[in-house]
Image (spheres, rainbow, N blue to C red):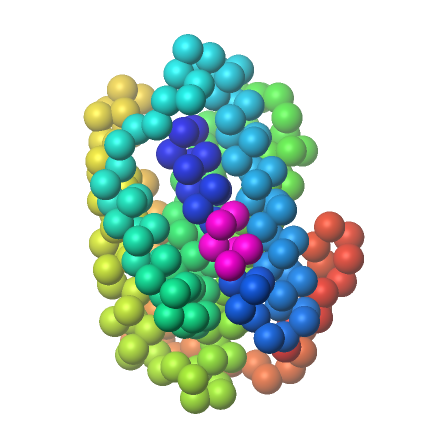
Amino acid sequence: MTFLEQGERLAHNCAEAQAALATDSGVRQFLSTQARQEAAHALIFQGAIAWLAPKHLGNSPYLPAMEEYQALLQDALIREDLVETFLAEQVILEGLGEAVLTRIEQGLMKRAAPFGRLRRVLLQQEEAHRGIGCRQLERAIARGKADVSSLQRRAQPYLALTDAIILTLSDLFDTIHEDASAWAADVRTFLPKWLVTDELPGISGQTSVMRIESKPIAES
């Protein structure tokens, strides 16, 4: 839970910075909304820690891979490379979070755990954040601002770090009789197939509308 809280705070900081860089008003509004949602998610995980293991509240496991991921993402923000930030945050990092939360949700459902509606909303928001990232990459390809091979190449260090983040926690997975490598591999199932295979992206030039906080937001 502490790992997830850290990831949400990283996502919050990134979305805030992306909103300042975005030139499209619809995308900027979505990113501002995402930043607020990520901050709320971090508080949810903090509350879960206080509920499940209050003596560990405030503890921060040392995750060198997470720090390196943050450094890479920060470098992309400094370079104002919005395409790379969408790749690293909305697509890969959100994919990691969604993969982990989906695994956890499966166990919680079996145990009829409380707060089911809140958990569903959280997962839906994670999916929406990843969705806009995928569409922004596909539109960057369509406009000639990026190409598939370069995005695949740029994704590799980020994907290696998501593996390292999970595997660093392998001793915790052992205590619940889970295979950390299987959890790490799950991330790929939440990524666009063209990013991890030779499949071409399905690119649409049409404007789409995404509903966030009951408000329709047009994406460019």
- Where residue 153 appears, x then y in whole percent? 25, 71
Identify the residue at image location x=57%, y=62%: 19
Asked if residue 15 lies in the magenta stretch, the reply is: yes
Instruction: Classify residue 170 by image quadrant.
Output: top left
As drawn, the residue found furthest toward the front would be 78
Residue nearer the viewer, 112 or 49: 49
Residue nearer the viewer, 200 or 162: 162
Q: Which residues are magenta?
A: 12-17
Identify the residue at image location x=55%, y=55%: 16
Q: Can residue 13 be seen in this snapshot? A: yes
- Magenta stretch, main secondary structure, is helix
On the rendered image, what quadrant is the C terminus found in? bottom right
On the rendered image, what quadrant is the N terminus found in? top left
Q: Is residue 162 above or below residue 217?
A: above
Q: Is residue 2 above or below residue 199?
A: above
- Where residue 5 appears, x then y in whole percent? 46, 35
Asked if residue 144 lies in the magenta stretch, the reply is: no
Q: Is residue 169 above or below residue 132?
A: above
Identify the residue at image location x=22%, y=26%: 171
Identify the residue at image location x=51%, y=79%: 139
